[in-house]
Image (cartoon, helix red, strand yellow):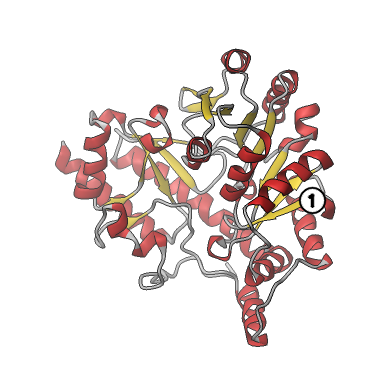
């Protein structure tokens, strides 16, 4: 490969949340972190060069994205997702979770219901509850190791609870589903019929694995798709979370104005100078690097699945169709959530995201982040194997 995905970069001492904040989360420096969705790969040299050039300029005043910025973002989305947003669709926020919280305030009132599908990325719950809204859950169902939507139950929940908004995770974190056009169209039909505003978190859109294609919710058809809020960012694809830049896309002018008002009410005035620089550079020059990255991640997922089947048969990988996060069923170990958490951290010396964080439906599961050099993944798997052998 042209790019280096094998070198283990020492991130300790960089104020990394993933590697340096272990005391705050009840871990020790001996625990190997494969938890938060943060990759351990350096940016492509072409992007680093653009960032360095911008730093060399030496002035970092108020910054707004240029026409070339919008061209880069829109072209990337068109190439990777099959639709092309227009520059006027954009609402800028420092991150997707910020946009989710702003959407809750824009489209609902205190006490209103907001629909989610657990097990789901835990900020979905927190942005609803912390804004004084009511969580409405239409849980996913898992059959033969694959999650899906029970549409009859989904519609019954919508009809009974009358949520004002639906936070859709597309692709889904943590279960790794790539929702099909048929599934999204059914969701759009139901949300359109009950006038539910859809906000689609598509930050993992670029990570569809071979045999799967990400479908943006805007292509689902129906009123809900026409008025939806699509949350995108280079933050996952290129690991830019620390630079705080996202691109929220809204076709409908009235919906866009409401979201823009909610964002403006926070006092937010624009993303960071280096965030804009990095986003444009990644989308203009990062394609070859990202293509190689997809192969590395797919290889790591396959490697992990093979390892579990060979050495850890009581742990079952839910085969992800997208993302670099794996969802592992640990229920055969026979441990409670508290016991499983302690086993992973105290016996295996790993720092993972426990499944119960994603809702009660995640009980007995663990989420692993495999966006790391193979040597790091192997170290984690070896620790897990030793711990499991001692357990039995």
x and y, in percent, of residue 294 in the image: 58, 54
Q: Residue at x 56, y 48 (%)?
A: 97
- Image position of 49 with respect to 225: above or below: below
Quadrant where the C terminus sits is top left
| Left or right position of 277 against 14 | right
Give the residue pinned by disc 1. Answer: 78
x and y, in percent, of residue 49 in the image: 64, 79
| Left or right position of 212 against 311 | right
The secondary structure type at the circle numbered 1 is helix
x and y, in percent, of residue 180 in the image: 67, 31
Q: Residue at x 54, y 31 (%)?
A: 133
Q: Is residue 51 visible?
A: yes
Q: Is residue 170 visible?
A: no
- Image position of 173 with respect to 285: above or below: above
x and y, in percent, of residue 46 in the image: 65, 75
| Left or right position of 353 against 243 | left
Q: Between residue 169 and residue 333, name the one nearer to us.
A: 169
Q: Residue at x 41, y 72 (%)?
A: 14
Q: Between residue 180 and residue 90, name the one nearer to us.
A: 90
| Left or right position of 46 against 385 | right
Number of marks in picture? 1
- Image position of 385 with respect to 107: above or below: below
Hey, which quadrant is residue 115 in on the image?
Answer: top right
Quadrant where the N terminus sits is bottom right
Q: Between residue 177 and residue 246, name the one nearer to us.
A: 246
Q: Judge the density around disc 1: few (<14), some (14-19), many (≥20) Cα neighbours within 10 Å.
A: few
- Image position of 197 with respect to 55: above or below: above
Hey, which quadrant is residue 170 in on the image?
Answer: top right
Q: Residue at x 68, y 61 (%)?
A: 269
């Amino acid at each position: 490969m042209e790019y280096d995905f094998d070198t283990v970069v020492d991130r300790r001492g960089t104020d990394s949340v993933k590697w340096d904040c272990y005391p705050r989360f009840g871990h020790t420096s001996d625990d190997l972190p494969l938890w938060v969705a943060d990759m351990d790969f350096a940016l492509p040299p072409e992007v680093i060069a653009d960032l360095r050039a911008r730093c060399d300029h030496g002035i970092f005043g108020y910054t707004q994205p240029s026409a070339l910025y919008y061209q880069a973002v829109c072209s990337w989305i068109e190439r990777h997702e099959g639709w092309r947003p227009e520059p006027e669709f954009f609402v800028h926020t420092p991150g997707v979770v910020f946009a989710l919280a702003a959407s809750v305030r824009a489209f609902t009132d205190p006490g209103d219901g907001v629909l989610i599908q657990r097990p789901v990325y835990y900020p979905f719950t927190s942005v609803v509850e912390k804004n004084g809204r009511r969580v409405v859950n239409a849980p996913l169902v898992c059959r033969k190791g694959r999650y899906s939507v029970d549409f009859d139950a989904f519609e019954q929940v919508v009809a009974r609870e009358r949520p004002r908004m639906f936070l859709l995770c597309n692709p889904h974190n943590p279960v790794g589903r790539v929702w099909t056009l048929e599934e999204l169209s059914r969701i759009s039909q139901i949300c359109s019929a009950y006038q539910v505003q859809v906000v689609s978190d598509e930050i993992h859109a670029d990570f569809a694995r071979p045999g799967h294609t990400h479908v943006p919710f805007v292509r689902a058809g129906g009123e809900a798709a026409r008025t939806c809020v699509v949350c995108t960012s280079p933050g996952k694809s290129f690991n830019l979370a620390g630079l705080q830049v996202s691109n929220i896309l809204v076709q409908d002018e009235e919906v866009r104005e409401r979201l823009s008002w909610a964002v403006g009410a926070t006092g937010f005035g624009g993303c960071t100078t280096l965030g804009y620089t990095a986003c444009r550079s990644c989308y203009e020059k990062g394609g070859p690097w990202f293509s190689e990255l997809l192969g590395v991640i797919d290889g790591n997922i396959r490697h992990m699945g093979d390892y579990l089947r060979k050495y850890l048969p009581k742990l079952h990988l839910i085969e992800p169709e997208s993302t670099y996060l794996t969802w592992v069923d640990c229920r055969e170990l026979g441990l409670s959530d508290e016991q499983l958490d302690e086993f992973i951290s105290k016996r295996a010396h790993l720092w993972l995201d426990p499944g119960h964080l994603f809702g009660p439906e995640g009980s007995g599961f663990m989420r692993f982040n495999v966006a790391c050099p193979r040597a790091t993944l192997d170290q984690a798997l070896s620790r897990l194997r030793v711990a499991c052998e001692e357990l039995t």
